[in-house]
Image: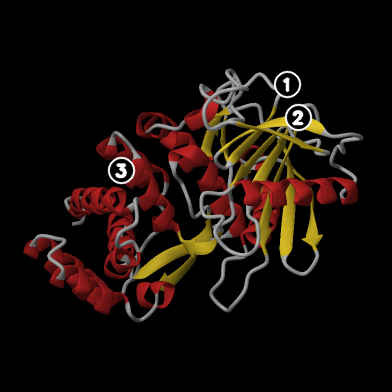
Amino acid sequence: MPERVDLALRLLARLERREQVLPAARSPREFLRQGRTVVAADLEVGGSELVPPSVRDTLRAGAEGVDLLSAPVAADVLALAKFDLGDQLKLRAHYVGGGLTMAVAPMPRGRNATDGIGNAVRAHEVVSAGAPGLRPRLVAHGRHGRSLRYLVEEWVDAAPVLTSGGLADAVAEVVAGLAAVHRVHGLELVPAGRSWGSGLAGRWEAVRAAGLVPAATGRQVAALVARDPQVRVSWTHGDLVASNVLRTPDGQVVLVDWEHSGVGVVGQDAAKLHLFSARPEETLDAVLDGWGHGVGAPACTAAEELALAHAYLLGRYPARRAALEGHPRARVYERQVRRQVERLEQVLARCG
């Protein structure tokens, strides 16, 4: 990990010299490192929302597991991504005085690779047209060499809602903001099988075979999948978890981390909100209220669309369970899957 952090600091120094909107350090500064997080030694860590809560109370000079570093870098906080595991760096840096934040990610490799920075840049254009306050302002973006892309945004004075209860409190505003994006971007009706791929029926049968859902639930969803109804497709965020939902001091909700955004089934954003909310029935009401209009024959109802989205996410289970075998997050994922089955059954109870 220390070697990875050293690489990241050297990369930041080069990017700061190249990108004119970024501050640049004239001489080396002192930093504290704990794990994947690096913080300027003179930053007030305790009260800073820029610093991950996991290290906020322990990141101090002389503490066990905390290293003192020196680098000619102007960024005040550097955090390597949770999944920064490849040969190319993935990180986020924050500039307190400059009011900026920068994301750096590898260029996509392969047909199915995610172009996170490209998605985020495109999302700026789409979201600004429908709900300009829903995401931070784009300042700059570009490439570094042949392997990395970066995105610089204006820092928003806001704190992540972080908890499932905080997410539940913000659901109505998230739904309203994304509904405005849908209206401007447009909604298209597309058969579910085409939206999620023709293998949806087979993946659902694998879910049933794994014993994940009660028999009655399995039959009800299988019948819905077999109908292949039309679902709504528009611009989606793609990762509506609590840490990506911020609230400003004046109460405005802002969504960050649009790296997974793009044209997709509206119900998938709804399914994430429903899955991670502490008050699922209330969230279900808000989602069906805010996104339940404009669906007519031969399309499915909004509740059926959401049920299909939950089923699609559950359909990933067999492959993902195998991939996570022995991984520390395997238990977390198993709990999430059980919760998703409960949410699916809540939605099916609303399907006429």
Return the x and y of residue 249 as percentages of the image width and height: 59, 20
Q: Which label sits on residue 284?
A: 3
- Residues 313 and 194: in front is 313
Is any atom of residue 227 visible in this view? no
* Disc 3 to disc 1, C-alpha distance: 45 Å
The kind of secondary structure element at disc 2 is strand
Report the residue marked by disc 1: 42
Return the x and y of residue 145 as percentages of the image width and height: 80, 65
Q: Tell me which residue sits at (57%, 42%) in the image.
A: 36
Q: Tell me which residue sits at (19%, 72%) in the image.
A: 222
Return the x and y of residue 284 as percentages of the image width and height: 30, 43
Give yes or no for contact between labels 2 and 1 (Cβ–Cβ under 8 Å).
yes
Going from the N terminus, do you reach mark 2 or mark 3 first?
2
Nearer the camera: disc 3 or disc 1: 1
Is any atom of residue 132 visible in this view? yes
Q: Tell me the amino acid under the disc marked 2.
A: Glu
Can you say which quadrant of the picture contains the C terminus? bottom left
